[in-house]
Image (tube, helix red, strand yellow):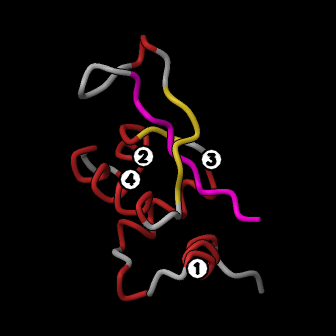
Amino acid sequence: MEIATTQRVLLFFGVQSDQVTPLDEQILDLLGHSGPMSAIDLGRALRKDRSVVRPALLRLHQRGAIEIAGRSSAARSWGDGGPAPIWALRQTP
């Protein structure tokens, strides 16, 4: 049986399971299955406001589990007025 995406990512980056919130797990699973997404797209898919999703993304980014894979086009700007980061699971060697 294959280990779930969330568990593989967390094991690789040495994140303790007690440091992971259910939202962290949902984000990692969604990025693993759907590929790179913006915070607003993740929020929509998870039925949560991006103001809830963004802190989780920043936390996962600090831990090294996800990375910014690119930026949205200028026509698709959110929040601070600039292009939105597109988040992806960090590529493991």
Residue 85 placement, left or right of 92 = left
* Residue type pointed to by label 2: Leu
Residue density around tag 4, few if under 14, some if 14–19, many if 20 or more, within 10 Å: some
Residue denoted by label 2: 42
Residue density around tag 2, few if under 14, some if 14–19, many if 20 or more, within 10 Å: many
Magenta span contains residue 87: yes
Residue density around tag 3, few if under 14, some if 14–19, many if 20 or more, within 10 Å: few
Residue denoted by label 3: 35
Circles 2 and 1 in contact, beta carbons < 8 Å: no
Circles 3 and 2 in contact, beta carbons < 8 Å: no
Residue 34: image tag:
none
Circles 1 and 3 in contact, beta carbons < 8 Å: no
At a point 52% along the width and 56% down the height, the residue shown is 66
Residue density around tag 1, few if under 14, some if 14–19, many if 20 or more, within 10 Å: some
Q: Secondary structure at mark 2?
A: helix
- Specify the segment rendered in magenta: 83-93
Q: Quadrant of the C terminus?
A: bottom right
Q: Earlier in the sequence, mark 3 or mark 2?
A: 3
Circles 4 and 1 in contact, beta carbons < 8 Å: no
Cα distance, mark 1 to mark 3?
17 Å
